[in-house]
Image (tube, helix red, strand yellow):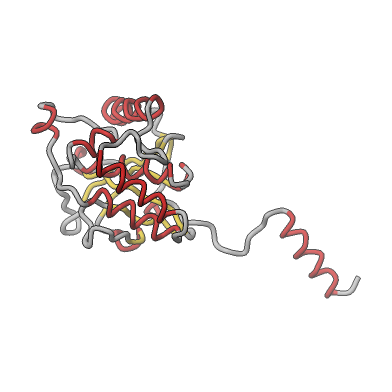
């Protein structure tokens, strides 16, 4: 059989089987990951908070096309965002969602709920105009899910912030990772400008991922260097 025909047969077969020439998407922060079902810390501390939010959103979603779960100007702003998102590239959608929630200032759970840890539903977060870092990430997660981003392309991530190398901030931090164009982008409430989203490569060496999760699963990445000490 002529070589040219062999090449054409190979290419046609590859296309039919779904093979792609592009490199596969990198893992989150290029980190190892294992299921978190046997991780005691995740199951005891983080999983119950996440399940509460998931159950609340399943029963009464915060984000709808009409914005009827939101109040006054919040509903109007949300409807405008939905309309703009329909004709915007996916990276612009990530920027719009991040900026929409980053407009509010952080608030401590102790000050609002009089408890050390409470993960807000998006409705709670919006109604009190701010929250902890995980509350920003959760609101962005459900907003982007409504706007059409699949769960597999979104992860809430619990991280340690490294400053400088080998030293870490005492508190944990939460961010949202969103995959677009085969790249993970980081949506952080501390980002400046407030609509800034940056590829994960810009955070390498600054963020150490401990856990990530979405509605489909949860994963362990690295052991916590602070708890080990």
Q: Residue at x 32, y 59 (%)?
A: 197
Query: In the rendered image, which quarter contains the N terminus?
Result: bottom right
Q: Position of residue 105 (x, y in %)?
A: 15, 47
Vertically, is 227 above or below 113? below
Quarter assignment of residue 210: top left
Q: Position of residue 221 (x, y in %)?
A: 36, 43
Nearer the observer, 181 or 171: 181
Vertically, is 16 above or below 60? below
Nearer the observer, 136 or 221: 136
Nearer the observer, 225 or 64: 64
The answer to whether residue 85 is left or right of residue 187 is right
Q: Residue at x 16, y 53 (%)?
A: 167
Q: Position of residue 145 (x, y in %)?
A: 43, 42
From this viewpoint, which residue is outermost toward the right?
1
Query: In the rendered image, which quarter contains the C terminus?
Result: top left
The answer to whether residue 40 is left or right of residue 153 is left
Q: Position of residue 70 (x, y in %)?
A: 29, 36
Nearer the observer, 84 or 12: 84
Vertically, is 124 above or below 144? above
Quarter assignment of residue 204: bottom left
């Amino acid at each position: 059989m002529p070589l040219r025909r062999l090449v054409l047969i190979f290419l046609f077969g590859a296309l039919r089987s779904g093979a792609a020439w592009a490199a596969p998407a990198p893992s989150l922060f290029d980190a190892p990951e294992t299921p978190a079902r046997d991780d005691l810390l995740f199951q005891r501390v983080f999983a119950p908070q996440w399940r509460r939010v998931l159950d609340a959103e399943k029963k009464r979603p915060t984000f709808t096309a009409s914005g009827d779960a939101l109040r006054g100007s919040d509903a109007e702003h949300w409807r405008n965002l939905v309309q703009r998102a329909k004709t915007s590239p996916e990276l612009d959608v990530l920027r719009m969602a991040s900026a929409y929630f980053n407009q509010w200032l952080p608030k401590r759970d102790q000050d609002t709920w009089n408890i050390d840890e409470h993960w807000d539903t998006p409705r709670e977060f919006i109604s009190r105009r701010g929250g902890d870092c995980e509350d920003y990430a959760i609101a962005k997660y459900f907003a982007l899910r409504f706007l059409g981003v699949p769960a597999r392309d979104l992860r809430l991530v619990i991280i340690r912030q490294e400053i400088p190398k080998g030293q870490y901030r005492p508190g944990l931090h939460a961010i949202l990772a969103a995959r677009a164009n085969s790249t993970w982008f980081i949506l952080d409430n501390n980002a400046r400008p407030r609509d800034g989203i940056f590829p994960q490569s810009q955070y390498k060496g600054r963020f150490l991922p401990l856990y990530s999760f979405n509605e489909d699963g949860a994963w362990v990445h690295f052991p916590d260097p602070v708890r080990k000490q």
